[in-house]
Image (tube, helix red, strand yellow):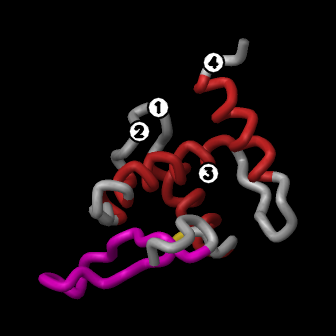
Amino acid sequence: MKSAYMRFLSLARMASTLPGMPALDPVEERLLNQFASFWGNDYQPTVLEALNIDEGISRRTVQRRIDGLRKKGMIRYQADHADLRVKRIAPTEQSFPNEV
């Protein structure tokens, strides 16, 4: 009998192979999962927060992967309402359907 987590992993793997889904490297996938946990709690992290989101990934690598996720249409930048200099990372329809 498969555990719920194993079923989840199987479904996630199948979803990533659907037509129109861009290929994500493991770091992009890890970041997107972390962003999704923020978005699920109605919070959009700032780019600066994202750079420090995972101690196991260098800030430079995170920045490159954020740029890659933007180019792939998985995230977008949104200006902060209180301070227009601050960029928040927001989902796109492709990364978080029905929530944009």
> Residue beneath label 3, please?
28
* Label 3 or label 4, whichever comes before in sequence order: 4
Residue 42 in percent (x, y) is at 28, 63
In the figure, 10 relative to 29: above or below?
A: above
Please identify the residue farthest to the left as the structure is shown. Answer: 82
Would you say the residues marked 4 and 1 are in contact, meaning their CB atoms lie under 8 Å apart? no
> Is 94 situated above or below 80?
above
87 within the magenta span:
yes
Q: Earlier in the sequence, mark 4 or mark 1?
A: 4
> What is the secondary structure assignment of the residue under circle 1?
loop
N-terminal of the two: label 4 or label 2?
4
Label drawn at residue 54: 2
Image point (40%, 69%), residue name: 89
Q: Earlier in the sequence, mark 3 or mark 1?
A: 3
Label 2 with label 1: CB-CB less than 8 Å: yes
Looking at the rendered image, the disc whose residue lies closer to the viewer, 3 or 1, is: 3
Residue at the spot x=33%, y=72% of the render? Answer: 88
Dot 1 crowding, Cα within 10 Å, few <14, some 14–19, many 20+ = few
- Residue 28 is inside the magenta segment: no
The residue singled out by tag 1 in the image is 56
Please name which of the two marks, 4 or 2, marks the residue nearer to the observer.
4
| Relative to 79, 30 lies left or right | right
Q: Which residues are magenta?
A: 76-93
- Amino acid carrying label 2: it is Asp
Indicate which label's residue lies in the foreground, 3 or 4.
4
Vertical placement of 43 versus 77: above or below?
above
Give the amino acid type for the residue marked by disc 1 in the picture: Gly
Between marks 2 and 3, how big is the CA–CA gap? 12 Å
In space, the residues marked 4 and 1 are separated at their CA atoms by 28 Å
